[in-house]
Structure formats: C-alpha cells, structure tokens
Image (cartoon, rainbow, N blue to C red):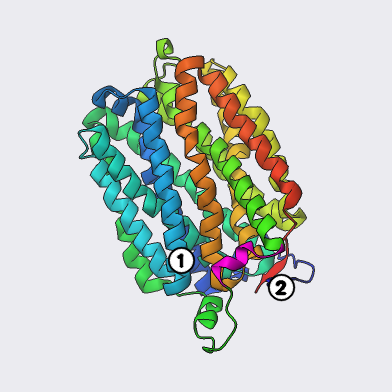
Amino acid sequence: MAEVAVAAPAPVVDAGALGWWRAGDRAARRALVAASLGWALDAFDVMLFSLTLAAVIAELGLTKAQAGALGSITLLGGAAGGLVFGHVADRWGRTRALMASVLLYSVFTAACGLSTTLWQFALFRVLLGLGMGGEWASGAALVAETWPARHRGRALGMMQSSWAIGFAAAAVVVGLVLPRWGWRTVYFVGVAPALLTLWVRRNVEEPAVWRARRDAPVGAVRPRFADMFRGPMRRLTAAVTFMNACALFGWWGLNSWIPAYLSLPTAQGGVGLGTRTMSWFVVAMQVGMWLGYVSFGYVSDAVGRKRVYVTYLLAASVLLPLYGAVASPPALLLLGPLVAFFGTGYYSGFGAVTAEIYPTAIRATAQGFTYNLGRVASAAAPFTVGTLAASRGFGTAFAVAGAAFLLGAVAWVWIPETQGRELA
C-alpha cells in the first residue's frame, strides 16, 4: 500500500486560545458545528437509557442481567451502524451519512417510549444503535478532512466534547421530566434531534478532499477496504481495533451503570440517591468529561497523540476501581468528575489518529471499522458489569472495567505517533 500520510512541518502556533478556530475557514467551522451537534444529540438519545434504567427495571420487571443485555445489544447495533454508515460516507458523502444516522437514532429513541415488553425495547434499541454508530464515523471524517493538521486534534476534541454536553442535557431532562411524567415521556423528547438534519442539508458542504477523490479519473488507483489488512497495516489495524475495544469496554462498563449505581437502593448494591440528586451527580461528571475531551485535543496537538492517550488510559484504570469502592455520596461527587475526565477524554484522539493513518477513499470506512468492531467487543461490558454487580457488587464490576483501560494502554506499544501528518 502506498504511503497514506507524510510528516508536516513543525506546528504553527496561533495567537490566543481561539486562534485555532479562526484558522479554519467557513466550511470547516460549519462542519465542526454540524458534527458536534450530531454527536451531542447522539449522546442525549443514547444515554437516556442509562439515566432511566432504574425506572425501566421497575416498570418492565427486568433483572440486572436483562437490563445489561439491553445496553449490550445497543452497542452491537452501533457497531453495525458504524460499519454500514462508514461505507455510505465514503461512497455517497459525509453529510448524507450524517443526516441519515441522526434521523435513525431520533426516530427510534422516541419509539423506545412505546415499548411494553423487553423484546420491543430491545428491537428499538438495536435500531437506535445503528444511527448512533453511523453518526461518529461520518462526523469524525467530516471534521478531520476540513481542518488543518496542526489544529485537527483540537477540532476533534471539541466535537468529542459535545458528547458530555449531550449527556448532561439528558441528565437535566430526566431530572425534570421523569418524576412528573414518567420515563416514557423522556424518550419522546428524544425525537427532537431530527430537526438538525434540515440545517445540515442547507449549510454543510462535503470536504474538498472527499470531492477530489470522488472526481478522480476513472483509471486512477483507488485504495480499497482490504488495504487495511495488507502488509504492515494489518498489525496496525489490529492494534488500533484492540485498543479501542478495551477503552470502549471500560467506558461503557462505567457509564452504562453509574446512574443505576447511584440511584438503586442500598439493599440492591446502589448508593440510594433520588432521581434528581442522581441527575445532578451525573451532570457534575459531565463537566469533568467535557474538560477531559477538550484538554486532550489541545495537549495532543502540542506533545503528541500517543503519550497523552496512554496517560489518560492509565489514570482511568486506577480511578474507576476507586470509584466503585467508595460508597459515600460526598466522596463520589468529588471523585466523579475526575473519573470522567480521564475515563472519557482520550476519545478526542481516536478520530485524529485514525484519520491520520488511513487514506481518504477508505477513511470513514476504516474509522467506522476500527471504532465499531471495537464496539462489538465492548458490547459485553453492560452485561458483564450488570452480572458482576448482581453477584459480587459494583466494586468488583467497576474494577473489571478498570482493567480494560489498562489493556488499552498496553496496545499502544504497536501504534505509532501520528501528530502533524497531513491527510493523503
């Protein structure tokens, strides 16, 4: 396979904290806004399940294992969506794939509110997951291809940080709506993100690098999906996918059960917080999450992707088991933002690393593959944590999730530094 990236000159430092924003042209800024809103609203819809889990368990009569299985099948749907929409984004365009994925997760989030059985809920969560997985693959490619190399980490960090905003917004909505109108109404609110597609259609252009690849002469040599597995790329693709699987296992093991851990009665192994108090604990964690995402982008642009990624993963591997061992609400309130900072911030770097490894013709497909094949493995996390929580307590369950972060850090032995590479 031909070289897919070349080293760029030393990064240019722009004046002011927002110098990087001014460095992007109008198309780049609109692309970042569109991808960020899509990712925030994705988080809003997807995380409603975790935030309403205690209420859903009570009304539908679910066990912890069944509830964990619902979380796992959502991730499997997300894995399939990432693979499908990655191909759609490479073939028909980043913006089209983005709009289709937003519509998909919006409609089936609302449908979850109509569920009366476990199987109905499961079907709607799988279909919702298809849209969830598709949004990241198309949005990350859109941002990576419109921003210059020296600011790519910060731009993708801002996009990734919008997940925390969407998660926090979901927690606020649950805190306000669920006590008054029940969990079903919470899901009906989730159809609102569909309106974003109208703005994207009118205002967001396809990246120039994608248009150039689309308009290349018929006889031009074009990279293929199989190129990810040829020669040295085979080991690199395997390492990136394994690292992402471990990190996603830790992330979903943590975030799919924290709201339930905080709100379940102490007799069931939880902390026993009320719904509104739990919601504000989660909002506090999203502040730490947002800061982790944004800081990662700035620091990785300055000192490199690899060193910062490994640091965040190692810190998360220590902090998550500690969080599961603490039962005091004041201590959890203080520790939560720190866990979220390191346990999520590293994902700002994943889009940049994969964009800098793979060529334009298969970039979204490769990002979707490495991200979402990892999600297939991580789909076991909600079920595993739920099962362990039921049999051995949340302390043991969160310790297992923390061990996954440690394995993710080890995988970086086989992943090179990509900072400063221009996109091929």
Q: Secondary structure at mark 2?
A: loop
Vertical arrangement, residue 380 with respect to residue 40, above or below: above
Q: Looking at the picture, how far across and down is residue 29, in whole percent?
A: 52, 67
Q: Looking at the picture, how far across and down is residue 288, in whole percent?
A: 57, 38
Residue 229 lies in the magenta-colored region: yes
Q: Looking at the picture, how far across and down is residue 98, in whole percent?
A: 41, 63
Write the start and end of the magenta stretch as one range. 224-231
Residue closest to the eye, 239 or 285: 239
Q: Are marks 2 and 1 in contact (CB under 8 Å)?
A: no
Q: Residue at x 60, y 40 (%)?
A: 246
Residue closest to the eye, 89 or 156: 89
Q: Residue at x 47, y 63 (%)?
A: 86
Q: Secondary structure at mark 1?
A: helix
Q: Looking at the picture, how far across and down is residue 229, in whole percent?
A: 62, 62
Judging by the rendered image, the residue that carries numbered circle 1 is 87
- Magenta region, main secondary structure: helix
Residue 104 vs residue 165: left or right?
A: left
Residue 219 vs residue 34: left or right?
A: right
Exactly how many numbered labels are in the figure?
A: 2
Vertical arrangement, residue 267 with respect to residue 162, above or below: above
